[in-house]
Image (spheres, rainbow, N blue to C red):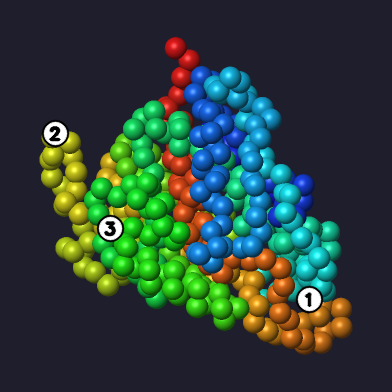
Amino acid sequence: MGNSLGTRFIVTSFGESHGRCVGVVVDGCPAGLPIGLDEIQSEVDRRKPQSNAGGTGRREEDRVEVLSGILNGTSTGAPICMLAWNNDADSSAYGEVIQTPRPGHADYTAFLKYGKYNDFRGGGRFSGRITAGFVMAGAIARKLLSLQGIEIIAHTLQIGEIKAGPHPADITRKNIDRNAVRCADPAATKKMIKLIKAVQEEADSIGGVVEVLALNVPGGLGEPIFDTLEGELSKAFFAIPAARGVEFGTGFGAAAMRGSQHNDLFSMTNKKLVTLTNHAGGVSGGLSNGMPIVVRVAFKPTASIGKSQKSVNLETGKRIDLSVKGRHDSCIVPRAVPVVEAMMAVVLCDFALRAGITGRIIS
């Protein structure tokens, strides 16, 4: 089973897309952390779909309920269990999924592993719906990290072939959330929204890239050789449905560079060792190096589209035409922004606890 992530800050995901609820259990949060329900709710609300950004027609309230681990606005040290009920699920469009796997989905691989016993409705455990729990956990991790001055900001870097220009140094979550696609470039934002609407009208979908930055991260976080910082972050990001690629710093661009170009040269600023560039993306040798951690996560187009596609009936073996029904996002990238932030926070929080940087809060 692979439903848990972390060693000291352990996150266990539960629930299915069309089951009764989705949620998470966070074990390892120190006692005494002040965390209000409104702080968790505000993060989950950022994940909700927006119609002008290709969001699904499914409208879940996603009202977070805390079942344990927080009392009077403070963590108790016990496991924190949080959930949101599924109140707007419509499973009527998924009856044929049992026999006919949808292209681009996990229907067939789930059938190979679980037979006919997995919850196939709306994708079940393989649906992006489960990321609501990821964001709940991320809210706890973010609050814990904030005590050390660590800040995490993600934004939409690319949708389709449209790329945002260089973002300003003072980029904030507030200015990112001002537009539906969560892009820091106003000119690119207009083009992205126009593209998403065009794709939606064609009963198709489009993918893109989310960039996430972690600021003020102390050096030395990570556990080489097999629990490297970039390895655990990649594992967390790939747990997000539709994530297809992860790169740090210059990433794949480094393959076309020379060492003299890619090496980050050292300098001293305010008695602190820094690098003049950040091609490494804040990670060297599997450890944080004190520079901003910069990661880009590529997301494929939503697999559920209204266009007719070829599939095969698993019982008869006959090839058939299939049009996916139901309510789906034409572009999941804007909704993935808070999810990427959450997974960055969860992993950094786990490593901070393992390093003893963030520990007991009780005074």
Q: Amino acid at mark 3?
A: His
> Position of 72 compared to 159: left or right?
right
Residue 339: image location, x then y, percent: 51, 51
Identify the amino acid type marked 1. Thr
Structural distance between the alpha carbons of marks 1 and 3: 44 Å
CA–CA distance in space, label 3 to label 2: 27 Å
**Camera-side residue of 139 and 286:** 139
Residue 356: quadrant of the picture: top left
Per the image, the residue denoted by label 2 is 271
| Disc 1/disc 2 C-alpha distance (Å) | 63 Å
CB within 8 Å, label 3 to label 2? no
Residue at the spot of label 1: 100
Expressed as whole percent of the image width and height from the top left, the position of residue 332 reads 53, 63
- Structural crowding at the residue carrying mark 2, measured as other residues with C-alpha within 10 Å and reported as few (<14), some (14–19) or many (≥20): few
Q: Which residue is mark 3?
A: 167
Q: Quadrant of the C terminus?
A: top left
| Amino acid identity at mark 2 | Lys
Q: Secondary structure at mark 3?
A: loop
